[in-house]
Image: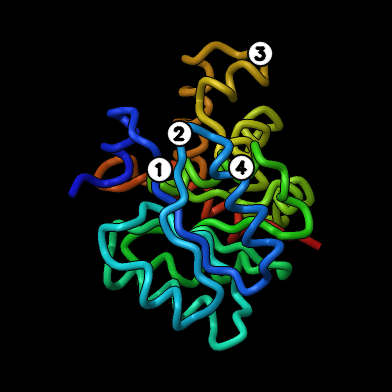
Amino acid sequence: MADAGAEQARGLAVRVAVVEDESLMRWMVRKIVEARPDMRMVHEAAGFAEGRDLVQPGTADVVVMDIDLGDGNGVALATLLQQRDPRLGVLLFSSHDVLDLVLAVRDTMRRPWSYLSKKSSLEPVTLARAIHATARGEVVLDPELVGKATAREGSALAALTQGQMKVLRLVAEGYSNAYVAEALQLSPRSVENHLHAIYKALDIPTENSNPRVMAVLAFVQQSSRY
């Protein structure tokens, strides 16, 4: 079975599963997914046990996962599902700030996890963008938390220029280079140059790795959110 990136390259819809014990929230996610031709809902589960049984390897590209499930822990379930299917993308959807979890799984799971807040990320375009970027193997962070984050004093992140930080914030929200260029009124080449400068400043290798993901994780690790 082809991975999500290959499916998107062929124009196939991203297959989405949602595990959420709040019926209204589950309905909202389904409506957002069903309203778009580039995504389709394949599984809906109301809890840990149902999600474990429904989301079988190869049946979904991304799982939108609540953390607090009535019959178990969403983080444990996401870990189990991704261990069974390493190509499955995980998008945590919670009322709590769980960015530390995004960092915690980076060294143990094959694919990084993304995170959106239920409190601030219910806009259809935000959820859709996060689902697609997660399917591509990128890390997406909640826009409100990205906006509040400030570089820790003395960190490599603090040495970035204002322009580089603007680019990195948009990348952290799951935007493509083309969108970043348009939003910041830059040329596509300028965006690429900014990204290469960011990777160098953050000491991120560009060979045998996904520097885009590592830059977003560095953003989380080296910033304060309060």
Quadrant occupied by the C terminus: bottom right
* Disc 3 + disc 4, Cβ < 8 Å: no
Marked residue nearer the N-terminal end (2 or 1): 1
Nearer the observer, 74 or 184: 74
The answer to whether residue 172 is seen in the rendering is no
Q: How far apart are marks 4 and 2 (CA)?
A: 19 Å
Q: What residue type is labelled 4?
A: Glu
Local crowd size for mark 3, using a 10 Å CA cut-off: few (<14), some (14–19), many (≥20): few
Which residue lies under the disc numbered 4?
173
**Quadrant in the picture for residue 112:** bottom left
* Disc 2 + disc 1, Cβ < 8 Å: yes
For mark 3, give the secondary structure.
loop
Q: Nearer the viewer, mark 3 or mark 1?
A: 1
Marked residue nearer the N-terminal end (3 or 2): 2
* Disc 4 + disc 2, Cβ < 8 Å: no
Give coordinates of residue 46: x percent, y percent: 56, 74
Is residue 209 depicted above or below 197 in this figure?
A: below
Which residue lies under the disc numbered 2?
38
For mark 1, give the secondary structure.
strand
Marked residue nearer the N-terminal end (3 or 1): 1
Q: Which of marks 4 and 1 is in front?
A: 1
Q: Residue at x 49, y 81 (%)?
A: 48
* Disc 3 + disc 1, Cβ < 8 Å: no
Which residue lies under the disc numbered 1?
14
**Quadrant in the picture for residue 210:** top left
